[in-house]
């Protein structure tokens, strides 16, 4: 199903005043260059050829050659957009005046507002819109709208930031890297206009070709990621920087699923589904943006490294590999062609070392890159070292170096494969020529490989349709037994089992099951830690002794006696899912068992997923070789595991409740199928419990009523339909 932008009618309205207002008023304008009011006035006045600009200050007189008014009411017209840069104590009065006059757009620069909720209600009641307060302002290169501290160079990157300071850092780094800004918005407190509103508003922003976002919280997370998906569909990929990758939440988690999935792993999954990329720093955001704005995305991970120094080539190859790219060995006709173009002793296997060829003839750079880009043996080329510095150190070479730079840009366009340059002269005139020709230039090799790896990740994840509202909604089951039934109905196999409450029921159940047995206190969330599970019970007498001891310690409740899975060559896996209140349903697969949190080997994706995507998740696990057959062991039934992951992902999308967790741990995967031996369903909200003796129904399954949808006994392979 193709991914499409949201229909125009579904977008929030009233943001035109923040794009291209016919008139602007800066309240709190100042003639003092150290004051915010000065910079806002200075920026606003730069757009006087497009709109009317009014400056309001109690001091009177002129500011930057422009007349001022004492209040909004003294202006000859009602401005379309009002920037508020007044002390917090005066903000209410100024907002009241603006709304009474009919102002519809407010930009709140003022910080430390006393009662933000009351202010938001006031703005909403008047039908106005407000960015901020605590905003650092906004800039739009398309309309010469500049109401923010600092200067901006026009370009193709939009920056929308929850932190004004971080947004300013991104904009500054972009400028230093030769990029420009199409639109800058500091969202501030988001009392009215939210991050989601502003991202949606960028979908049809003509100058924007890529978007950089900084988020500290995921208010309206569903809308935010829907907007990222729409931006990607519109050809505007998003690079996201987010704060909050903390283990504090995991320490209090009640399930392995929560303990093993950090906040940022959920964000990464949402990014992949939306076709966006999360990065760890502002510098990495700008590096990836430089790649996105100047050249095409790589279609694969294979990179050729070209250097004029063996050391720099080796370092570049190392960094590329660390970033998940591959540096394949070159051979055959391609290596022979490279050898013909280079001096004797040049390395042609990859990295390719020019061995002085560049100093002898600058066109060597062009010829080698042309051979590599045209070969089909690699997906991209990284040129690292001295190129870009010849003209700086030897001015007579400047023209020739610039010409080669232009030809390198033409090669990337012709072959449709990216070339990235790490140059010791990253700010030289030749570097500027490269950037203008569509070749990104980086001051460090780590920046170059970060950019290439990020671009490759974006190519791998173009985005997929949102999960939407499932056609079928399921009521959450109560307790382990009902959860088990829910999973069985979804096609997930369990061992044959009976629910028992006393010794008599247990003895009857043991007579109908095949030993060895497992006895469980089914209401406990973590049975092993609480002594609520005993395995390896060889006969009825042993099962009775285990029940008596467990009942003495734990009391009444629904216990379960089931057949123990004793198949050979089993790998224990965890399959978990959660419905996050802000990011929606997620599914996780990883190394399981009681050591799941020790291994911390998990992969998370937005739910639901199909079997193909579940297979891809499994391949990303570090334990994947164990599942595929390690050191002569037979391969497990990975197809059965993928089916379980897909089934659980569908269930979490269907279950009622805004915060729900569902977990199978362990799921025992063997060559002949997958068998779930424990399951857990929780409200994710702290304190909620869904599996206790007092909320189970002890008499609804007598000992002579078997679990008729169970898997086969341990002596036979589990039936994929779950029948004994």
Image (cartoon, rainbow, N blue to C red):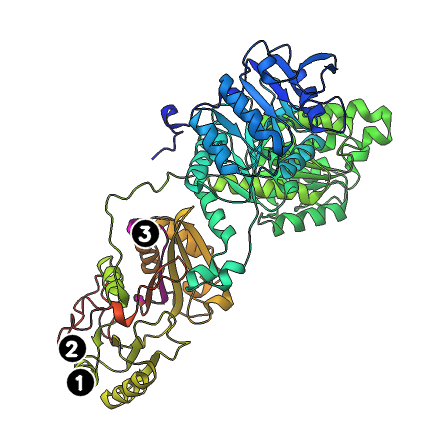
Tell me which residue sits at (24%, 62%) in the image: 488
State the residue position of label 1. Answer: 504
- In the image, is residue 395 above or below residue 635? above
State the residue position of label 3. Answer: 657
Tell me which residue sits at (68%, 31%) in the image: 367
Quadrant of the image occupied by residue 159: top right
Q: Element at badge 3?
A: loop
Left or right, residue 328 beside residue 539: right
> In whole angstroms, how far apart are the C-alphas of marks 2 and 3?
32 Å
Left or right, residue 481 beside residue 534: left
Q: Is residue 613 visible?
A: yes
Q: Nearer the viewer, residue 372 or 423?
A: 423
Left or right, residue 264 beside residue 154: left
**Which sits earlier in the primary sequence, circle 1 or circle 2?**
1
Q: Are marks 2 and 3 in contact (CB under 8 Å)?
A: no
- In the image, is residue 147 above or below residue 513? above
Indicate yes or no whether the magenta region holds residue 557.
no
Q: Element at badge 1?
A: helix
Q: Which residues are magenta?
A: 649-675
- The residue most toward the left is 704
- In the image, is residue 164 above or below residue 252? above
Q: Are marks 1 and 2 in contact (CB under 8 Å)?
A: yes
State the residue position of label 2. Answer: 703
Give coordinates of residue 655: x percent, y percent. Answer: 29, 52
Q: Nearer the viewer, residue 27 or 450?
A: 27
């Amino acid at each position: 199903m193709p991914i499409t932008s949201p229909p125009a009618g579904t977008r929030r309205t009233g943001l035109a005043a923040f794009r291209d207002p016919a008139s602007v008023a800066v309240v709190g304008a100042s003639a003092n260059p150290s004051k915010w009011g000065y910079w806002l006035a200075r920026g606003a006045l730069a757009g006087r050829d497009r709109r009317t600009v009014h400056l309001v200050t109690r001091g009177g007189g002129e500011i930057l050659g422009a007349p001022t008014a004492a209040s909004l009411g003294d202006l000859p017209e009602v401005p379309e957009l009002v920037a508020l840069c007044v002390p917090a104590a005066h903000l209410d009065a100024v907002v009241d005046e603006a709304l009474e006059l009919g102002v519809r757009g407010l930009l709140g620069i003022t910080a430390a507002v006393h009662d933000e909720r009351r202010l938001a209600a006031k703005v909403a009641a008047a039908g106005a819109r407000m960015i901020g307060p605590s905003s650092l302002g906004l800039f739009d290169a398309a309309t010469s709208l500049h109401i923010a501290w600092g200067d901006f160079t026009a370009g193709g990157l939009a920056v929308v930031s929850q932190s004004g300071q971080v947004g300013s850092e991104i904009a500054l780094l972009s400028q230093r890297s030769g990029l420009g800004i199409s639109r800058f918005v500091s969202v501030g407190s988001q009392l009215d206009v939210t991050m989601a509103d502003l991202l949606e508003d960028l979908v049809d922003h003509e100058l924007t070709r890529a978007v950089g976002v900084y988020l500290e919280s995921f208010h309206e997370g569903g809308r935010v990621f829907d907007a990222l998906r729409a931006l990607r569909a519109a050809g505007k990929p998003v690079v996201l920087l987010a704060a909050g990758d903390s283990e504090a939440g995991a320490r209090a988690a009640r399930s392995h699923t929560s303990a093993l999935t950090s906040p940022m792993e959920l964000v990464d999954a949402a990014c992949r589904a939306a076709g966006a990329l999360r990065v760890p720093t502002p510098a990495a955001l700008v590096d990836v943006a430089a790649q996105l704005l100047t050249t095409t995305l790589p279609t694969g991970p294979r990179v050729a490294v070209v250097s004029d120094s063996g050391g720099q080539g080796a370092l570049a190859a190392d960094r590329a590999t660390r970033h998940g790219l591959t540096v394949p060995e070159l051979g055959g006709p391609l290596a022979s062609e490279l050898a013909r173009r280079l001096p004797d002793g040049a390395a042609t296997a990859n990295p390719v070392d020019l061995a002085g060829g560049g100093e002898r003839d600058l066109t060597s750079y062009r010829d080698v890159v042309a051979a590599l880009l045209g070969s089909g043996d690699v997906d991209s080329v990284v040129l690292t070292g001295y190129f870009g510095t010849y003209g700086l150190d030897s001015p007579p070479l400047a023209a020739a170096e610039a010409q080669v730079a232009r030809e390198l840009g033409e090669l990337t366009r012709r072959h449709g494969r990216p070339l990235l340059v790490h140059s010791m002269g990253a700010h030289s005139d030749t570097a500027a020529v490269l950037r203008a020709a569509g070749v990104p230039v980086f001051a460090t090799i780590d920046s170059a490989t970060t950019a290439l790896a990020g671009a490759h990740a974006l190519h791998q994840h173009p985005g997929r349709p949102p999960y939407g509202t499932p056609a079928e909604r399921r009521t959450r089951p109560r307790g382990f037994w009902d959860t088990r039934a829910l999973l069985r109905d979804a096609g997930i196999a369990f061992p044959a089992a009976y629910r028992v409450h006393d010794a008599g029921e247990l003895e009857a159940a043991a007579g109908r099951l095949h030993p060895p047995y497992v006895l469980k206190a089914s209401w406990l969330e973590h049975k092993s830690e609480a002594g609520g599970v005993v395995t390896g019970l060889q006969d009825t007498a042993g099962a009775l002794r285990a029940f008596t001891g467990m009942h003495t310690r734990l009391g009444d409740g629904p216990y379960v006696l089931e057949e123990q899975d004793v198949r050979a060559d089993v790998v224990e896996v965890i399959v978990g899912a959660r419905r996050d209140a802000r990011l929606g349903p997620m599914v996780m697969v990883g190394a399981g068992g009681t050591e799941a949190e020790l291994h911390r080997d998990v992969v998370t994706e937005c739910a639901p997923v199909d079997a193909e995507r579940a297979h891809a998740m499994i391949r990303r696990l570090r334990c994947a070789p164990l599942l595929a057959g390690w050191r002569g062991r037979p391969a497990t039934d990975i197809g059965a595991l993928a089916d379980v992951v897909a089934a659980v992902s569908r269930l979490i999308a269907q279950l009622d409740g805004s915060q729900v967790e569902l977990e199978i741990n362990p799921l025992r995967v063997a060559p002949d199928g997958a068998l779930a031996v424990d399951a857990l369903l929780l409200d994710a909200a702290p304190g909620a419990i869904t599996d206790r003796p007092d909320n189970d129904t002890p008499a609804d399954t007598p000992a002579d009523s078997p679990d008729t949808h169970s898997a086969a006994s341990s002596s036979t392979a589990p039936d994929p339909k779950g029948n004994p």
